[in-house]
Structures are given as C-alpha cells and as structure tokens.
C-alpha cells in the first residue's frame, strides 16, 4: 500500500477506548474520534487492539552463513507477520558478527528488506570463543550503531572477560546480554534436569547452571556500574536472583521467551525434537514463576529467541537434533494465551513488555513509542477474538520448527505498519 495517508478506524488503542488513528507521511498525524480525512485509505479496525510495533531483543536471522534455515529477508517477513517492526539479530552467524563489517552487512540487508528494522547484536568475544573481546567499540561506532552485545548460543563463562566487557560497553551505554549457562554443568545436556530426565534417561541441564551465572553477572554489573541483560531466563530460581538484584537498584534486565511461558519438560516424553531447545523447557512450577515475574515486572520483556533450523536438523533422533524453535509468527498469540486471557496482563502491559521495554533496553530509537500525535507510525493491529490452529505450512519463515503445530491459539495480527507503510494488511504480507 503506497498511499501516504491511512486511517485506522475504531481501534482500541492499547486495549482502551475505540479511537481513530490517522497516519500521514510515516507518522501518527492524529488520534481521536470521528476522524474522516479526505483521500485516506481506511482500515476498519472495530474490536481490534492497536499496539506500538513489537520489538524483539532476540532473533536469529542466520544470515550470513546459514541461509538454508533463514535469511534477513525471510526472517523480517516472519517478523512483520508476527507484528514486529524491529528485531535484534543475534551474532552467531557464519562468519560471526564480531566486526564492524559483518554487523553493517546485516544492518544493510535489513534496510533492503523493508519489512522491519534490523538492529544487529555484536558478539562479545572473537568468534564466540570466550577468549578475547571482539571489536566492541568499532561495532558501536559503525553505521549499525550496535548497543547490544551477546555471545548467545554460548555463555561468556570467564568472569574476567565478562567484567571487561561490562566495563567496555559502559562507555557508550551498551549492554551485555548473557546466555546464562555454566558449560561444565551442562556438558552433554539434552533436557531439563529433573524427574522427567531421570525417567527418560537423558542427561539433564540443571537449573543451577543458569542461576549461578546470573548471580555472578548481576554482582559483576553492580561492581562495574554497567548494564547486564539476561537472555531467555527460564527458572524460578533465576527469577528470585533478578528480583533481588533489582531490589538493590542494580541495572539488570531480563527476558523470557513465549515457549518458556507455556511449555514444560513433560512434552519431552514424546522424544519429538521440536521440543529440544536451549535453555530447555522447564517444570510447571518454573512456568508459573515466569508468568508471575513477567506480570510484576521482574522480567522486563518477552523475546522470541526465534531459532530457525532446516528440517534435516530437527527431523532426526533426539540426541543429534539441533536446539531451537521458531517464534516470531506465534509470539503475540502465546502471550495473549498465557498472560492476557489469564488476566495476568492487559494490552497496555503487553505493549510495555513487547515494545516499550525491549526498545529501551536495546536503545532503539523510533520504536517502542506511544501511539500519539507526532510519533513514528510503527504500529501493530491485532484481532484478539480470533482463534485458529497454527499451520507452519503457511509461515513466512523459511523454517518450520514450531512446537505449536496444530495447537489452537488466540489472536491474529491483521496489520503491521513500518513508518506508516503497511507491511501486513488483512493478515497477509503486502
């Protein structure tokens, strides 16, 4: 849709009263009732909820190097379908995004795609090897303006390297996003350590392997006076450590994935590798703790950890299957199912956890802004009354490794606008 003027009529802005929102030349030109501008393309939105465009702090786009599973183009198309107007692309590509050249390549591919903004995440260490700091300053000063650094997929387990990284990024208000996994405690781990792993005979991934790294890193961040962000927090114990750190006033933030808000390790009894993920699916008690922590703000935001894999890497025996799930196209539906429909969050709080806070953590300008006059028109329109089964065959992503195939979930993104341009309309890519 190329028109410069669009009227979204009768939407519930952040779940509140019905209003009309006029988009003109890439910005929100007016918000009110009874708006009827001449020449505007009208999107009828009665009964639908209008949110600021969603922001994902944790997306694997795989390009460069693993274009068989995803590309920047296909990944951003999936993001738009899911209601995202910006994603942070993780650094574990081939080559690793540990130089200004690679992050600028990813950033430019995002610009060319046009479906959502792509903010590269820079590696903390060269080659994700945990031995030598990467070019943090050069990546920060590049055209991509990197502010989030992570070795995600691997833990920065060396305390000295982690301290140095925290000290370095402080100079330009960056943040280190930690994949909290003590490697020696999880060597050969296949699933959550607990009764189910014992019954199945699979080597367990203990909660303490996550919690011990988080405890160390919040102490390091406090000591240095820097920002640390905890990726894909998954245990009740981790929640308590983050809650304690925040009570001290330390600059600690955390994310939770949609799948850790819904799924448990009981599903592994099927031995279906679609449920193999890192960190692993945990217990029902952990799921309850994560939902409560997201509701009370201890966990700052929802991040998808969208991890696409080709079928040959997932349709195989459990022991050799790759870890990860796609999540961009189902994230908002899972959050509605687990948090909104259960009464734990309202839609304004969803906007906070899926747009405002992740944009703030990532220091991403132009996103996570109020739906008000003069703001960039990065917007998401969702029909909360929709119910439908997840069909991976219809995904925009290049990969299909979803744990929700056939599951009926609520909500459907009907429109996504990136700076006023519709990237999704009537639930379909434009």
Image (tube, rainbow, N blue to C red):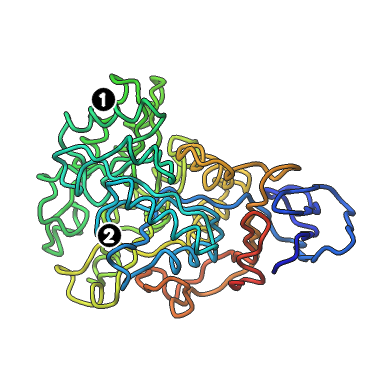
Q: Which residue is mark 1?
A: 220
Relative to residue 105, is residue 316 drawn left or right?
Answer: left
- The answer to which of 41 and 216 lies nearer the viewer is 41
Relative to residue 52, is residue 13 drawn left or right?
Answer: right
Q: Which residue is pictured at 80% across the width and 52% down the height?
A: 19
Q: Position of residue 246 (x, y in %)?
A: 40, 26
Relative to residue 40, is residue 379 drawn left or right?
Answer: left
On screen, residue 243 above or below 28:
above
Dot 1 lies on which element? Answer: helix
Which image quadrant is residue 240 in?
A: top left
Which image quadrant is residue 387 in?
A: bottom right
Q: Position of residue 57 (x, y in %)?
A: 43, 48
Q: Which residue is pictured at 51% across the width and 52% down the height?
A: 86
- The answer to which of 196 and 81 lies nearer the viewer is 81
Q: Which numbered disc, 2 or 1, marks the residue that appears first in the sequence?
A: 1
The quadrant of the rendering that contains the C terminus is bottom right
At label 1, counting other C-alpha atoms closer than 10 Å, the crowd grade (few under 14, some 14-19, many 20 or more) is: many
Query: How many numbered circles are shown?
Result: 2
Q: Are the residues tagged 2 and 1 within 8 Å (C-beta)?
A: no
- The answer to which of 144 and 405 lies nearer the viewer is 144
Q: Position of residue 179 (x, y in %)?
A: 27, 44
Q: Which residue is mark 2?
A: 277
On screen, residue 229 above or below 414:
above
Dot 2 lies on which element? Answer: loop
Q: Which residue is pictured at 15% across the width and 62% down the height?
A: 199
The quadrant of the rendering that contains the N terminus is bottom right
Which image quadrant is residue 42 in?
A: bottom right
User: How far is the residue under mark 2 from the one under mark 1?
Assistant: 28 Å
On screen, residue 152 above or below 264:
above
């Amino acid at each position: 849709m190329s028109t410069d003027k669009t009227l979204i009529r009768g939407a519930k802005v952040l779940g509140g009263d019905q209003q009309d929102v006029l988009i003109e030349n890439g910005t929100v030109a007016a918000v009110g009732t009874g708006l009827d501008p001449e020449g505007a393309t009208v999107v009828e939105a009665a009964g639908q909820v209008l949110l600021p465009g969603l922001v994902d702090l944790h997306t694997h786009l795989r390009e460069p190097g693993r274009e068989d599973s995803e590309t920047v183009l296909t990944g951003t198309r999936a993001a738009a379908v899911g209601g995202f107007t910006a994603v942070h692309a993780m650094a574990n590509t081939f080559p690793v995004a540990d130089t200004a050249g690679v992050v600028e390549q990813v950033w430019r591919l995002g610009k060319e795609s046009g479906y959502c903004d792509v903010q590269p995440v820079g590696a903390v260490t060269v080659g994700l090897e945990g031995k030598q700091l990467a070019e943090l300053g050069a990546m920060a000063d590049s055209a991509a303006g990197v502010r989030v650094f992570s070795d995600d997929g691997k833990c920065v387990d060396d305390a000295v390297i982690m301290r140095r990284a925290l000290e370095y990024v402080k100079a330009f208000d960056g943040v280190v996003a930690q994949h909290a996994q003590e490697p020696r405690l999880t060597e050969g781990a296949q699933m959550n350590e607990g009764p189910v792993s014992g019954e199945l005979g699979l080597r367990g991934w203990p909660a303490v392997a996550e919690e011990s790294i988080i405890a160390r890193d919040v102490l390091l961040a406090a000591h240095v006076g820097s920002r640390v962000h905890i990726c894909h927090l998954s245990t009740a114990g981790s929640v308590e450590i983050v809650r304690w750190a925040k009570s001290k006033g330390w600059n600690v933030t955390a994310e939770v994935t949609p799948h850790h808000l819904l799924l448990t390790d009981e599903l592994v009894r099927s031995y279906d590798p679609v449920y193999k993920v890192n960190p692993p699916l945990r217990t029902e008690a952990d799921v309850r703790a994560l939902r409560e922590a997201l509701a009370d703000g201890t966990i700052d935001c929802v991040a998808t950890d969208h991890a696409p894999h080709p079928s040959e890497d997932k349709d195989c025996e459990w022991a050799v299957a790759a870890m990860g799930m796609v999540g961009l196209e189902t994230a908002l539906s899972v959050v509605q199912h687990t948090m909104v429909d259960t009464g734990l969050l309202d839609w304004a709080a969803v906007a906070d956890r899926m747009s405002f806070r992740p944009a703030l953590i990532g220091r991403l300008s132009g996103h996570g802004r109020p739906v008000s006059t003069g703001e960039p028109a990065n917007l998401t329109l969702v029909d909360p009354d929709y119910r439908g089964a997840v069909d991976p065959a219809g995904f925009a992503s290049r990969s299909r490794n979803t744990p929700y195939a056939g599951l009926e979930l609520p909500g459907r993104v009907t429109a996504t606008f990136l700076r006023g341009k519709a990237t999704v309309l009537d639930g379909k890519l434009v």
